[in-house]
Amino acid sequence: MFKSKKLSKLQNIKHGFFNKNGGVSKGIYKSLNCGIGSKDNKKNVKKNLKIVKNKICIKSKEIFLVKQIHSNKFIFINEKSKITNRSKKVDAIITNQKNFPIAILTADCVPILIYDNKKNMIAAVHAGWKGAYNGIIKNVINFMFKQGCKSINTTVAIGPSISKNSYEVQKDFKNKFVKKDKKNINFFKDSNKKIYFDLPNYVKTQVKLHKIKNIDFLNKDTFIKKNNFFSARQSIKFKHNDYGRNISIIVIN
């Protein structure tokens, strides 16, 4: 488990970014696969989620997850909400409820955990290139600000994801981003006739647009095998028919 130094300094919350170590799953899902939607044995996934819950020392019965669809949509959960776990097709969760752990799953995409220590509000965001491009970060932060959160009180932790040196893309992908904003050219690197995209720094820049200065950047590449993260691109490389998911979690005490 990896922790944000900035989030760790704050009281009233617990959090963690997990890689594939410490679980019970076998084969290509070895071992802490938390992807309930994967083809892994469901009993093993549930055991893995319980391991995560115990590691964070959470009192709640379960971890709240959603069906991620690479969108720019989110869900807000308050004391009036009556929502079944994994019933909503969104890519971010916001809540102000205590002992209600929220989490997102990734396998190269960027996990983002957010906390406003005055409003006591948290968010967990799944930012793949589609979600980031279409404004998932803006939508979440703007909503939190409308609820009374402020940039000066907000801490954002950008978790492990695929890095610029590993994320090869096609020319039309690059053109799509540059067409939207010419400054996006700065997030691409051309090397040996290949194009690479800097997704985590693109995400970081999106956060900075909201004048948030308390940003923690966990610079770990999920594609690099020695880092022991589940990686969709690694699974494609080795021609696996599926892959496990890493979990990133946050909860208000």
Image (cartoon, rainbow, N blue to C red):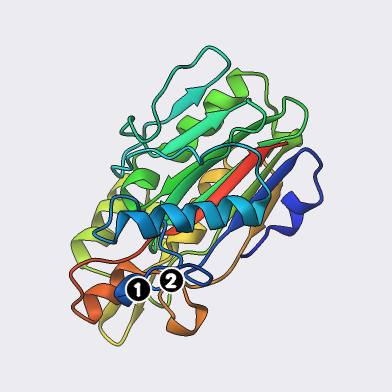
**In what element is the residue under mark 2?**
loop
Q: Classify the position of the N terminus by image quarter.
A: bottom right
Q: Is residue 108 left or right of residue 239?
A: right
- Looking at the picture, tell me which residue is in the foreground, 206 or 27: 27
Seen at 46% across and 56% down, the residue is 47
Q: Could one spot residue 17 in this view of the protein?
A: yes
Q: Residue at x 51, y 39 (%)?
A: 62
Q: Nearer the viewer, residue 252 or 195?
A: 252
Label 1 residue SS:
loop
Q: Which mark is residue 31?
A: 2
Q: Amino acid at mark 2?
A: Ser
Question: Would you identify the image quadrant in which residue 209 lies?
Answer: top right
| Disc number placed over residue 165 in the picture, else none | none
Note whether 238 is above or below 189 in the view shown. Answer: below
The kind of residue tagged 1 is Lys
Q: Residues within 10 Å of mark 1 (few under 14, many from 20)?
A: few
Instruction: Examine the rendered structure and indicate whether residue 221 appears above or below residue 59.
Output: below
Circle nearer the N terminus (2, 1): 1
What's the mark number on residue 26? 1
Q: Quadrant of residue 147?
A: top right
Q: Position of residue 56 (x, y in %)?
A: 66, 52
Q: Confirm or deny contact between disc 2 and disc 1 (CB under 8 A).
A: yes
Nearer to me, 217 or 113:
113
Outermost residue, front direction?
43
- Residue at the image position 48 percent from the left and 52 percent from the top: 49
Q: Is residue 83 left or right of residue 42?
A: right
